[in-house]
């Protein structure tokens, strides 16, 4: 057994004694487990997913190596290599800007899911929180034209954060007061948010753009609310400063969890609600606070997209978007840590860009197939991360003769 | 040494061991869990395996039951060397195991559980329940283990569930029975019944391996006692001539004080006053029924009783975890009734919980984080919402040193510590909060003798510092050696007050609800 494995097992095992883990909720276990085991498991997981994807490429009669190379070129990540020069370099720069634009909201929705996991909650509602954040930011961004840019942007971003917080807070409050399962309530709230958006911006809807009455879309964000572009051409969708806001949010996430009383309480509640209430913490209150914080992250994610490059919200966009759901995969792969979430978001953002028909060379691999490949790789990653958890759950609840005894003996060893 | 003593130790019943482990060594990486351990059991004898937590008892038994392959050594059954690679092989060789956590299906009947895995079938593969019931009756009569084959497992007592486990092992043809801490879950009455059962099994020629860390029980039931310490066999002794003191010395490796030195209490003003308290349990039944009591500064008052007589709810009410239905709880003049844990903490109530894994610790937290759980709101540990991580850590370092916690520094995870050290962390945290009232609920549960000694000494010291201590315990010995006054609880009511020198019979009467002539 490797040291890492032993350590993980020891931790898990010790928690089992005397039904000590009986009080751990499934998301709490999942969250705790996923955080352990360092970086090896996520890297392995990703690798396996890519190999499986490669096999599929092989079956379709293409060369997996040249396909992956083309996808990599599409992401623009080769920009970091100094030997890429000339027009290849400017293409790479443009591609990388797109990758990072896609990465920005993924970081934020990833944090929205990860923070819930740390509190022992499963936030499936990232999509709904993202949607209400988008609605509010496009509404605020297209109103008050002429405000000073810093103020206008702040108003729109804070508004989106609050909207997301309220939306997720509903699920948190229901959980705290009535014990409503947050998985169910956040899924329901997703649909409410989506259809509210469709109503608001649809034909004849109260917020539909008055300048183009036949198009189901919002008004456009005014210039004063647009996020400044710091890399590339603002007319050609250069990279906006939202990336820094997302990275700052990751720092906030870490500081909040590890350096504040709120984070201490949230983590205690997430890992052992019984011990938390024994210490005088209100489990219900922390559920609510944690959900509200999750929602704020997801709301900001939407504001970054709206104020950074979308500038308006079409109803079919609202229905087709899946950024919020990707946040679950990002958080799981990132092991619910700040740095892990950022890296996982970059991976998923790069995959999204690298396989889009704008950037992938069609002579190597059909982009339509490639984007399916992306979905497949993402799906495999989630599946592999989750099966870890399934295996863990079996180990936990298994009352098999051998399991219990091995556990006890291992614990004895760990305790020496 | 074992070889030279063996002839003298051999029980008369048989000349050949039913089972022999020779020179078993089992390593996990660099950790040697068992170091050349010899162990044997003869038909018709009880051989106890004694040792502290982590001494290697469970590893040895896992080797015996085919869960681990030893690095060195051999296993001999009935004179034949065997290789036990799985529990199935162990069962085939006649080795039966009764685990601490029972492996029964709660919704099935006794008979169904008993035959599980080896079901008698009729033609066509249908389960022959009639035959199963008959087998249950047959075996239970043979060994005098009375059980109702049609009772559902979830409806019968823990003691009966254990009987079913034993019967199941016998049903599968066990001639060697391994019992892993069998008394940990039993009431005093059930322990006595188990002892009787073991006597009958012995007479029938079954070899019994009895694992425990309770010295008294081992002395009561075992013919021979093997002591393990740090993975090594220290000695094998006969019951005759062994005393609790001599065994404790072997187990811990030094002289242990089994009874605590205690001076007269200097009880001062009342610190905890409970008046006409009524508390309901999770099922909304009255668990605490009109309890009034007081604990003065500088004394230990023990609540003695059989588990499940309202102790849990009483403790939860006093510590603010559960709102009482009626009554008043006053600590040092502050009414904290129904005000929650924070109010109790502010009134300087500390609480060593019964279950350190469920409540006492957040296992995936570091020791520093665990040590801050009681006082994290105080300005020394956090200010304006920010944790003072530096102070939390340095305070933890100091506490870990003061309480001699071994197994890791402030950044180690609580889960990586042994039970005794985990309990020390919980106790350190509670006492460090400088409480006026310390509620200690089964503070030595699951600890070995060395750790029990530490906890007992510490509680007396804190008493002498003028703290009021409310001790809730299921152990006669603990209650009588620590308490200045004993209150017996039965079905949520205080049956009477007793002096610490009250006889076991007197207490036992009150604990089972028979109104004795109360001394107080």
Image (tube, coloured by chain):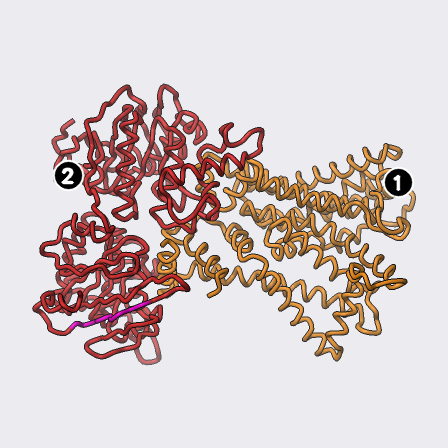
Chain under label 1?
A: A
SS at mark 2 in the image: helix
SS at mark 1 in the image: helix
Q: Which quadrant, please, contains the C terminus of chain B?
A: top left
Q: Where residue A294 appears, x then y in whole percent?
A: 64, 44
Residue designated by label 2: B509
Residue B134 visible somewhere in the drawing: no
Q: Which quadrant, please, contains the N terminus of chain B?
A: bottom left
Circle number at residue A282: none
Q: Residues within 10 Å of mark 2 (few under 14, many from 20)?
A: some
Residue drawn at point x = 41 percent, y = 34 percent: B321
Q: Quadrant of residue B207?
A: bottom left
Residue drawn at point x = 43 percent, y = 58 percent: A397
Instruction: Give the main secondary structure of the magenta stretch.
Output: strand
Residue designated by label 1: A223
Q: How many marks?
A: 2
User: Chain B takes which shade in the image?
Assistant: red
Chain under label 2?
A: B
| Range drawn in magenta | B17-25
The chain whose colour is orange is: A
- The CA span between labels 2 and 1 is 86 Å
Q: Residues within 10 Å of mark 1 (few under 14, many from 20)?
A: some
Which of labels 2 and 1 is toward the front?
1
Residue A143 visible somewhere in the drawing: yes
Residue drawn at point x = 24 percent, y = 55 percent: B212
Q: Is residue A185 left or right of residue A209?
A: left
Q: Is residue B215 magenta?
A: no
């Amino acid at each position: 057994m490797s040291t890492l494995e032993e350590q993980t097992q020891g931790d898990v095992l010790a928690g089992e004694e005397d039904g000590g883990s009986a009080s751990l909720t499934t998301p709490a276990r999942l969250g705790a487990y996923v955080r352990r085991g360092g970086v090896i498991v996520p890297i392995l997981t990703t690798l396996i997913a890519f190999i499986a994807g490669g096999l599929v490429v092989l079956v379709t009669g293409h060369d997996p190596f040249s396909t992956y190379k083309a996808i990599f070129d599409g992401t623009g990540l080769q920009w970091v290599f100094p030997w890429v020069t000339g027009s290849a370099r400017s293409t790479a720069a443009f591609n990388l800007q797109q990758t990072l634009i896609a990465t920005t909201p993924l970081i934020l929705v990833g944090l929205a899911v990860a923070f819930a996991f740390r509190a022992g909650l499963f936030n499936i509602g990232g999509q709904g929180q993202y949607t209400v954040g988008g609605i509010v930011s496009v509404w605020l961004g297209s109103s008050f034209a002429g405000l000073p840019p810093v103020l206008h942007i702040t108003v729109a971003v804070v508004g989106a954060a609050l909207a997301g917080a309220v939306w997720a807070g509903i699920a948190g409050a229901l959980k705290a007061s009535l014990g409503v399962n947050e998985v169910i309530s956040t899924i329901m709230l997703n649909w409410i948010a989506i259809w509210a958006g469709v109503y608001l911006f649809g034909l004849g809807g109260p917020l539909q753009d008055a300048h183009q009455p036949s198009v189901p879309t919002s008004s456009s964000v005014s210039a004063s609310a647009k996020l400044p572009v710091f890399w590339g051409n603002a007319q050609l969708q250069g990279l906006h400063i939202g990336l820094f806001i997302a990275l700052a949010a990751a720092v906030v996430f870490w500081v909040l969890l590890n350096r504040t009383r709120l984070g201490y309480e949230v983590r205690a509640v997430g890992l052992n609600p019984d011990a938390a209430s024994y210490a005088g913490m209100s489990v219900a209150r922390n559920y609510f606070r944690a959900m509200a914080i999750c929602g704020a992250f997801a709301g900001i994610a939407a504001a970054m997209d709206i104020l950074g490059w979308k500038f308006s919200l079409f109803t079919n966009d609202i229905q087709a978007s899946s950024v919020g759901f990707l946040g679950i995969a990002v958080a799981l792969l990132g092991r619910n840590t700040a740095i892990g979430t950022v890296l996982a978001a970059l991976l998923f953002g790069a995959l999204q860009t690298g396989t889009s028909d704008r950037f992938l060379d069609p002579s190597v691999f059909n982009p339509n197939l490639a984007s399916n490949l992306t979905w497949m790789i993402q799906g495999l990653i989630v599946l592999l991360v989750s099966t870890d958890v399934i295996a863990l759950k079996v180990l936990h609840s298994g009352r098999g003769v051998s399991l219990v005894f091995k556990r006890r003996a291992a614990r004895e060893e760990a305790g020496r | 040494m074992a070889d030279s003593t063996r002839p003298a130790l051999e029980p008369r019943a048989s000349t050949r061991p039913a089972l022999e482990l020779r020179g078993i060594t089992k390593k996990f990486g660099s950790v040697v869990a068992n170091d050349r351990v010899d162990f044997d059991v003869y038909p018709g004898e009880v051989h106890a395996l004694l040792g502290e937590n982590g001494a290697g008892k469970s590893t040895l038994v896992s080797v015996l039951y085919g869960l681990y392959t030893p690095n060195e050594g051999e296993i001999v059954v009935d004179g034949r060397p065997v290789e036990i690679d799985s529990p199935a092989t162990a069962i085939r060789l006649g080795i039966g195991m009764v685990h601490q956590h029972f492996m029964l299906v709660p919704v099935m009947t006794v008979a169904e559980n008993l035959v599980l895995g080896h079901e008698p079938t009729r033609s066509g593969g249908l389960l022959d329940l009639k035959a199963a019931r008959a087998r249950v009756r047959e075996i239970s009569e043979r060994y005098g283990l009375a059980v109702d084959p049609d009772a559902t497992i979830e409806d019968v007592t823990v003691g009966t569930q254990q009987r079913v486990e034993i019967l199941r092992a016998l049903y599968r043809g066990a001639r060697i029975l391994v019992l892993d801490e069998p008394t940990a879950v039993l009431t005093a009455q059930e322990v006595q019944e188990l002892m009787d059962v073991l006597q009958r099994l012995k007479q029938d020629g079954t070899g019994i391996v009895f694992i425990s860390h309770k010295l008294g029980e081992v002395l009561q039931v075992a013919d021979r006692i093997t002591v393990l310490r740090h993975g090594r066999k220290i000695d094998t002794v006969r019951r005759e001539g062994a005393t609790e003191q001599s065994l404790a010395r072997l187990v811990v490796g030094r002289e242990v004080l089994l009874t605590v030195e205690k001076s007269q209490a200097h009880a001062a003003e009342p610190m905890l006053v409970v008046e006409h308290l009524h508390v309901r349990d999770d099922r909304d039944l009255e668990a605490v029924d009109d309890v009034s009591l007081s604990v003065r500064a500088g004394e230990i008052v023990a609540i003695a009783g059989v588990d499940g007589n309202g102790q849990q709810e009483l403790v939860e009410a006093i510590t603010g975890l559960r709102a009482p239905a009626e009554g008043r709880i006053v600590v040092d003049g502050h009414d904290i009734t129904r005000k929650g844990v924070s109010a109790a903490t502010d009134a300087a109530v500390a609480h060593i919980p019964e279950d350190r894994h469920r409540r006492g610790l957040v296992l995936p937290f570091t020791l520093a984080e665990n040590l801050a759980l009681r006082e994290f709101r105080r300005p020394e540990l956090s200010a304006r919402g920010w944790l003072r991580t530096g102070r939390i850590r340095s305070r933890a370092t100091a506490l870990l040193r003061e309480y001699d916690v071994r197994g890791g520094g402030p950044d180690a995870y609580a889960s990586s510590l042994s039970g005794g050290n985990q309990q020390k962390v919980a106790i350190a945290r509670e006492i460090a909060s400088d409480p006026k009232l310390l509620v200690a609920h089964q503070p030595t549960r699951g600890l070995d003798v060395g750790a029990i000694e530490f906890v007992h000494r510490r509680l007396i010291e804190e008493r002498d510092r003028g703290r009021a201590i409310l001790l809730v315990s299921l152990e006669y010995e603990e209650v009588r050696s620590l308490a200045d006054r004993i209150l017996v609880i039965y079905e949520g009511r205080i049956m009477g007050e007793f002096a610490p020198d009250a006889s076991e019979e007197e207490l036992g009467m009150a604990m089972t609800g028979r109104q004795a002539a109360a001394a107080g």
